[in-house]
Structures are given as structure tokens and as C-alpha cells.
Image (cartoon, coloured by chain):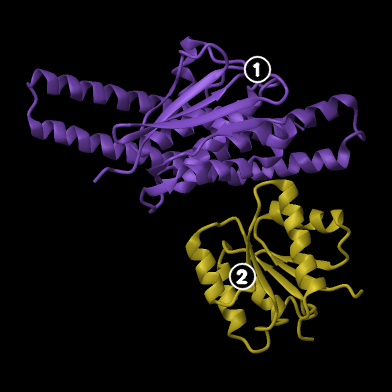
Amino acid sequence: MNEIDVLVVEDDEADALIIREAFEYYKIKNRLHVVTDGEQALRFLRRQPPYADAPRPGLILLDVNLPRRGGLEVLAELKADPALLMLPVVMLTSSRAEEDILRSYSLHANAYVSKPVDFEHFIDAIRQIDNFFLTLVHLPN
Amino acid sequence: MTGIAWVLAAAAACLLVLSTVLAIRLRRTGSRITGAVAAARTGSTELSELEARAADLQRSNAELEQFAYLASHDLQEPLRKVASFCQLLQRRYAGKLDARADQYIEFAVDGALRMQALINDLLVFSRVGQTAAQPSLVSSDAALARARENLAQDLEKSGATIEAGHLPLVMAELPLLTAVFQNLLSNALKFGGAASPRIVVSARPDGRFQVFSFTDYGIGIEPQDAERIFVLFQRLNERSAYPGTGVGLAMCRKIIEYFGGRIWLDATTAEGTRFCFTLPGESDE
């Protein structure tokens, strides 16, 4: 199977590391790219400097609470951009606020996942997200 | 390794401060009520002053709830990190350092997980009565059935038998009533003594209330502990023999009182433990 690029937009270094560990633990072959704020995420996706050579990711894991441009703002911008709107976006966040869930889906997020408090559940959630979006479902090429 | 110890110590300190503040404020609230009642008895206090005190009390309680909620919610996030990375250390390096390091890591993981359980329970505890839901007539049969479902694995493992007749409709909320049954059931399993503990649940009407009784034939509780068991974080037994956070019965009391009932330990039972609680039933009109 081809390695697929996954973009993680996460300002929390520890959580980004846990996601990386989960990929390693489950021997997920896909390549991880981590950016730490919404501005960088949009630059990465639009291949603007310093991300001129960035690959087009097959999946985006997007935190809600991000510095500068928040996750919901990034989501709105992606889904309004014809070149990007088909990329599957999973909101991965510690927020369980009903309002964030509602706003994410009304902005066409593909899924909303609360970061599980338990470590085992957290890495299992990463495995399941990866498996569902990058193995199970058919996405447009 | 010292880094983890520091973080754990800091988190433990937070929890300690939190519970102390809770305890102090609850005590203060209690003495205010006593003061207000005494004033009412002597008739020396104007009604308006009493009302002002009641409002004050209500506000202080609301603040307290809010505080417990926010503190437990905000503590969860950093604690998740501590627990996660302790577990990662364990996964990656168990058996690769030395025996002492393995033990340090084991204690760190154990401490972090226990604190996580405490904070989760505290969060659930502080949420009782905070939702928009209103009490309505619910089936206590259904609540018991749900509690049994949630504990299906433990019930099966212990080989427990539950004897319950038909249970009445009461004014409550199903999730909260389920939590009461679940806490009592899980206590009965934990302290049920011998293999295949026996649990008897029944209810009888008393005026406009229904009186439930919940009996196990296990190790029992000394009468002098009858009040202490309902206090938040209070535990009577060694943690190694009987794990738990000490939130269960405090939560039961909070829920039952929220619906206008009472819960107590029935000391008249000769063997095992019997809890009784009341809930408003179907009104006659």
C-alpha cells in the first residue's frame, strides 16, 4: 500500500508526540507532518513558503484550540476553497463543548473526535481514525 | 524520572488543595445553615435578613459547584499528559533500565491513573444537577436494569445473584438514578464477601415517598462509620484490598438529596450492609 501523508495541526507538542507514538506503535506506515498553528496549516496546504514542496495530505487532523488562527477558522477556510474542500478533516481536540461540535459539523468537518483521557484509548483512537479514513473508505483521487 | 515525580507531586498538591477548599467551604455552609435556623428559632432576626442569608447560601453553593467543575475539568488536561508519558515510559523502557527504575515508573503510573480516576469522579460528582433536565416519573426497574448492564462483566465475574422484585416509578432522572444503583451495586460486589455475593433490592411506599432498601451479606460497616461513608473521598478500607476513589456514596447522597430524598445506612441489619433511600413517588392526585 502507498504511504499517505497525514497533516497534524497541533500546537501541543506532547499531543503531537503521542500521535507520533501511536503511529509507531501500530506500525502505521503513513507519513506524519506536524504544524503548530492555523496559519502554518493553510500555508502547508497551499504550498506557500516555507512549504513549497509540501505533499498533498490524504487526511488532516485538526485541533480546535490553536494559536493565531483557530481550528474552526482553518476549517472554514479549507471548506470554502475548491482546491482543498475534498480533503477529509478530522477535528481532534480536548474540547467536548457542544458548541464546538456543532460548529465543526456545520462547517463540514468529516468527523469530530475528543481526545480520550486514557492513553490506551487515545492511541487506539488514532489507529481507528487512520484505519477508517485511509484504508476503509473510498475517497476521490 | 525526577521530572515525573515533580509533576505528580504538583498535581497531587492541586487535588489536595481542591479537596481541602471543598471541605472548608462545605463546613462553612453547614454552620451558616445552623446559624440561620437558630436565628429563626429565637425569632430575633427579621425575615428579610433570613432571606438574604438564604440567597447568600445559594450563591456560595453555586460558586462551589462551579469551582469543583472547573478545577476538575482543568486538572484533567495536564494530568492526561503525565499519565500518558508515564505509560509510554513503561511501555518503552520497562525491563531496560534497572529494577529500581521499573518500580519508580510503576508507582508513577499507578499514582497518575489513580488521580485521573479521582478527578473524573469529582467531575461527575460536580455535574450532578447541573444539566437542564427536569425530574420526571421514571422506572426504577429500568434504572436497575441499566446499572446491571453497565456492570455486566463484574457481575458475571463475581457470580453475584440479585434478587429484586418489581420496583416502582419515582420522580428522578434516569441517568442519575442509574448512577445510584450502579454505585450501590458495585459496592455490594466489592464488599460482598464470599464468592457469589447475594444482593437484595426492594421498595415499599411510605406516604408520598418510596423507600428502597439495598442489602448485601458481605463484610458490613461499623455503625460509627454510618455518616463518614457519605463524605467525599472518605474510604474505610485499605486501597490494596478494596480499590476506589471514595466518591461513590457521596455521589449517591448528592443525587438522592437533589431529588428531595434521603439516604442512610440501616444499622439494624445483623449481617452485611443495608442502605435505604427514599425518593418521591407517583403522587395520588
Q: Amino acid at mark 1?
A: Glu
Q: Secondary structure beneath disc 2? A: helix
Q: Quadrant of the N terminus of chain B?
A: top right
Q: Are marks 2 and 1 in contact (CB under 8 Å)?
A: no
Which x, y percent locates residue A8? 71, 66
Which x, y percent locates residue B86? 75, 39
Same chain letter for marks 2 and 1: no
Task: Give the chain letter for purple.
Answer: B
Which x, y percent locates residue B4? 71, 35
In which chain is the residue bearing label 1?
B
**Residue under the image location 64 percent in, 40 percent down:** B151
Q: Is residue A24 left or right of residue A33?
A: right
Which x, y percent locates residue B271? 57, 13
Which residue is identified by label 1? B238
In which chain is the residue bearing label 2?
A
Q: Residues within 10 Å of mark 2 (few under 14, many from 20)?
A: many
Q: Amino acid at mark 2?
A: Gly
Compared to A27, does A70 lie above or below? below
Q: Residue furthest bottom?
A: A82
Front-most of residues B242 and A1: B242
Which residue is identified by label 2? A38
Q: Is residue B102 left or right of residue B179?
A: right
**Residue under the image location 48 percent in, 31 percent down:** B202
Q: Look at the image and give the colour of chain A.
A: yellow
Quadrant of residue B154 within the rendered picture: top right
